Image (spheres, grey):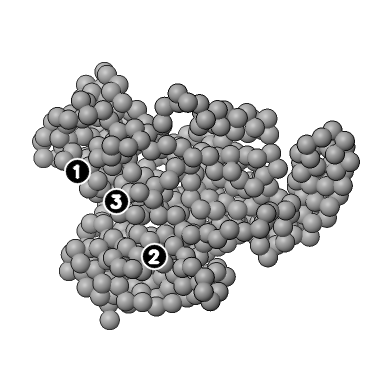
Amino acid sequence: MKRAVIAGAASLMAALTAGCAEPPVKPIPEAVRRSVTAASADVSGSKNSDTSKLGASGTDEGGRLGALQGAAMGANSGSLLGMLVLMPVGAAVGGAKGAAEARPAEIVDETRSNLRLALQDTDFTELLRRRLATSKAAGATDFSTVTSGSASAPLATSAGTPVGHVIALEYRLQLYSEYLVNPLIGVYVQVTAQVQSPDRRQLLHSATWSYCSERTEFVQAAANNAALFRAQINQAATILGEAIPHDLYVSRQPRTLKAKQLNAPASVYIACMDFSDLPSRTGEQPFIPASPTAIPLAPAAQSQSTPTPVVVPTPVAAVAPTPVAAVAPAPGGVDGTWQMDIQVSSTFCLSQSTSVTFANRTAEGPWGKLQVAPGGELSGWMKLKPLATGSIDYLVNVSGRLENGSMAGSLSGRCSGTFTMRKP
């Protein structure tokens, strides 16, 4: 496993640094897309829901994983003598700290179960399909005809307009993590698009997007039936649902990979993309202040224990999607002033209340930007006040839903939590 991770990291860095490397996402060439007024797409994919080895369950497992981490730190000392001297010392210190910081077995078992069910229960195929179908980023190209299932894209829109492109979208979804004992976890999604001629006989263009959410301490991410982790999956669908048609049919610039280094002794990297330039700014990343250099098995108060290798996403059998009927709220049910009450569960931001005014389903101001899709899905970003006086406001991602005259959802990023919105 470790060899595979290191080899994958080396291949990634080689691809990123090669002068002739093609960016993974480029706009469709102008000559190919110039006359295309409508495109259809189908969505299929797979999820890896194996969380059975995530984190340390009890002191015995914590000691074993901590010793592995300590020994790995010694092995990377840079010299043979240093390795021989530091490996046993690192294993002893890491084992003691790992045993002390490991969560009780019943908490870890529940955490693993909640995260596994979140991955299994979430119909990402339908989430991405709905986001793509309601995206308006394609401009002059109608991108609203999106179906679930491989090779199911129709050759005409619902209005009967023939499509110029048929796009096959295939995704891989799983969590990724760093540290072993009390890992920080996030959502990883890779989506590949094959743009084909209407008869599906000619491949005209291809692109691959890689999305990585912010990482959260695994027990916190799994709390309340994994509410935060589920919100991060929904946010992934929101961002990718806007980025795919935008990058193919609107943008004139490629979207390239950036190597994100995880805090691991072997300098493990994972390939992610920056989506902060999307028109809706939904992909804006939360501001995270600089932190001191990480040491092995940091105190539990910082929720950082032992580094863990990044697992390369492994395709699993696709889960059959269950279509969800979206009921569009009346515009009058969205527009107007709402009272938003925010409850923050992290120790970085203040819980707060604010007034938010929507016009044409969009609310925007110095505090952030929120949008409500026709199906009732709420997405966007906000600034939250920090606990520390004089600190910079934190940016957080917001996702939720309008139901029965009220909105509710989750905040993700540096300041995680929940919110409710009602009209006064």
On residue 337, which mark appears? none
Residue 276 visible (yes or no): yes
Say few, some or many: other residues with alpha carbon within 10 Å of mark 1 (under 14 / 14 to 19 / 20 or more): few
Q: Determine the CA span between mark 2 and mark 3.
A: 15 Å
Disc 3: which residue: 279
Q: Determine the CA span between mark 3 and mark 1.
A: 12 Å
In-image side of 189 versus 248 (left or right): right
Q: Quadrant of the N terminus?
A: top right
Say few, some or many: other residues with alpha carbon within 10 Å of mark 2 (under 14 / 14 to 19 / 20 or more): many
- What kind of residue is marked 2? Met
Can you name the residue that lies furthest to the top here?
Answer: 201
- Mark 3 element type: loop
In-image side of 249 versus 307 (left or right): left
Disc 2: which residue: 382
Image x and y of residue 380, in percent: 35, 59
- Mark 1 element type: loop
- What kind of residue is marked 3? Pro
Disc 1: which residue: 139
Image x and y of residue 326, in percent: 26, 54
Residue at the spot 35% in from the left edge and 35% down from the top edge: 254
Residue at the spot 84% in from the left edge and 33% down from the top edge: 80
- Mark 2 element type: strand
Is the residue 160 above or below the residue 300 in the image?
above
In this view of the protein, which residue sits in the foreground, 374 or 394? 394
Is the residue 327 above or below the residue 367 in the image?
above
Say few, some or many: other residues with alpha carbon within 10 Å of mark 3 (under 14 / 14 to 19 / 20 or more): few
Location of residue 406 by image quarter: bottom left
Residue at the spot 44% in from the left edge and 55% down from the top edge: 285
Image x and y of residue 295, in percent: 72, 53
In this view of the protein, which residue sits in the foreground, 274 or 199? 274
